[in-house]
Amino acid sequence: MLTTATLNKVTTATSDKLKALKLYGMVKAFDEHIKSSDNNSLTFEEGLEFLVDREIRERDSRRLMFRLKQAKLRHQARLEDIDYNHPRDLDKSLIKSLSTCQWIKDHLNLLVIGPCGVGKSFIVCALAHKACIEG
């Protein structure tokens, strides 16, 4: 039977090893699991899956944050935030087709034109945000 001091030493060592491997998502999940009261409820496979899934989510999140930071978007816009009711002749089907980001994969450029104040920058930022999400 492990004493509390021995268990703390083991968990600290494990956490340090995960940090040395730069598995920060696993470190967070491991620490949360140790602090939770039901830490004996998972099988080894379930626990490992939990750690790996958390690491993948953390890495995806970091990549997205890096892309958004590099993009230096003027507006925090998302495609879902575009108001199609405003009278500016936006083609909803065109925006939907652009949201697939196929134009980026095909190495095409996008030119958004229109009068001042209709939301061109907002639309471009929303499309750029979607592109960051898509990678």
Image (cartoon, grey):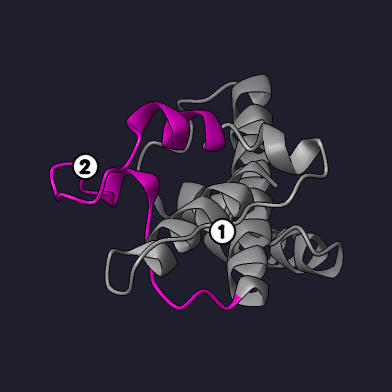
Q: Nearer the viewer, residue 6 or 93?
A: 93
* Rendered view: 72 above or below 40: below
Can you name the residue that lies furthest to the right here? Answer: 21
Image quadrant in which you'd find residue 122:
bottom left
Which amino acid type is marked by label 1? Lys
Residue located 52% across and 25% down the image: 42
Badge 1 marks a residue whose secondary structure is helix
Residue located 75% across and 57% down the image: 23
Residue on which disc 2 sits: 84
Quadrant into which the N terminus falls: top right
At label 2, counting other C-alpha atoms closer than 10 Å, the crowd grade (few under 14, some 14-19, many 20 or more) is few
Q: Is residue 125 left or right of residue 46?
A: left
Give the mark nearer the N terminus: 2 vs 1: 1
Q: Is residue 14 left or right of residue 82?
A: right
Residue located 40% across and 26% down the image: 93
Q: Which segment is the magenta one?
A: 72-98
* Rendered view: 52 above or below 68: above
Residue on which disc 1 sits: 28
Which amino acid type is marked by label 2? Tyr
At label 1, counting other C-alpha atoms closer than 10 Å, the crowd grade (few under 14, some 14-19, many 20 or more) is some
Q: Is residue 2 visible?
A: no
Tell whether position 97 is magenta: yes
Q: Mainly helix, strand or loop, the magenta region?
A: loop
Badge 2 marks a residue whose secondary structure is loop
Tell whether position 89 is magenta: yes
Which of the numbered marks, if any, corresponds to residue 4? Answer: none
Position in image of residue 106 (x %, y %):
81, 36
Image quadrant in which you'd find residue 35:
bottom left
